[in-house]
Amino acid sequence: MSPVIAVLGLGEAGSLIARDLIAAGATVRGYDPAVPTLAGVPDVGAFTSTGGEGEAAAGADLVLSVNSAKAAVGALKAAISAESIKPGTAWADLNTASPGVKRELAELGEARGIPVTDIAMMAPVPGKGLKVPMLASGAAAAEVAGQLTSLGAHIEVLDGPAGLAAMRKLLRSVFYKGMSASIVEALDAARAAGYEDWLHEHIAEELARLDPPTVDRIVTGTRQHAVRRGAEMGAAAQMLTELGVEPIMADASRLLHERIATKAI
């Protein structure tokens, strides 16, 4: 028998995952208050559009919550309130929420006999769909990973509670998204100054030269030269302001260097 999987949230990520689940032979029960159905997929047979979280979860072997971090807790509460989700049904939250929210979900589920698995998607879903690399943690993580892996998913199970997968993802996000934002801000300023092509090439060359020891060099150098670099980023922030670019990342860098310098004194 094909597994019955509820997908809560049929936006970009949820719709791609739902399509791949259907293609792999699963029966999908979907719900999204903003997206009434799955475009291009008949509302019969392998896919059914439902009117709420409880209706979608009723009779499901697994529930995937792929709506949004702010809707994650409300979705589980709505399914529990509807009293249609039976104890033992696995609930997996794929939203990019904080570890604290994931732990709250696990506690809510545990009180009703619903094991909650924290799943972190570690790359953009478009282009990968269900095959997007994922991390999973929580009491039923191995079971949920087994169900989804049998349908084509790529999931690494972490030995730890719900919240651990989210923590791993968000720790990486501090680095990667922070770097990305700084690059965008720097290029905006370079464009305003007429040197965008030069800086673009310089950034590409620097990224191409990165190797594992680079991390240690960056951390050591930042701590050793925090005073000077803080002053340098203050000047950089002033330059961006003069160019008409708000120095959000540059000023944040100044503040961090100043904090490091103060602690080192």
Image: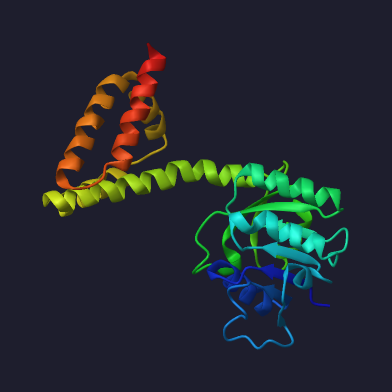
**Residue 161 x %, y %:** 73, 42
The colour scheme is: rainbow
**Residue 228 x %, y %:** 25, 22
How many numbered markers are drawn?
0
Residue at position x 60%, y 55% in the image: 70
Seen in the picture, residue 192 relative to 65 is either above or below; the reply is above
Which sits in the foreground, 141 or 71?
A: 71
Q: Is residue 13 left or right of residue 158?
A: left
Q: Is residue 189 left or right of residue 169?
A: left
**Which quarter of the rendering shows the C terminus?**
top left
Q: Is residue 100 left or right of residue 226?
A: right
Residue at position x 35%, y 41% in the image: 210
Name of the residue lying farthest toward the left = 194
Name of the residue lying farthest toward the top = 265
Seen in the picture, residue 167 relative to 224 is either above or below; the reply is below
- Can residue 259 be seen here? yes
Query: Residue 81's quadrant in the figure?
Result: bottom right
Query: Residue 238's quadrant in the figure?
Result: top left
- Can residue 162 be seen here? no
Residue at position x 50%, y 68% in the image: 126
Query: Residue 90's quadrant in the figure?
Result: bottom right
**Residue 115 x %, y %:** 80, 53
Q: Is residue 173 left or right of residue 7?
A: left
Which sits in the foreground, 7 or 176?
A: 7
Residue at position x 37%, y 34% in the image: 214
**Which quarter of the rendering shows the N terminus?**
bottom right
**Residue 39 x %, y %:** 57, 83
Which sits in the foreground, 44 or 153?
A: 44
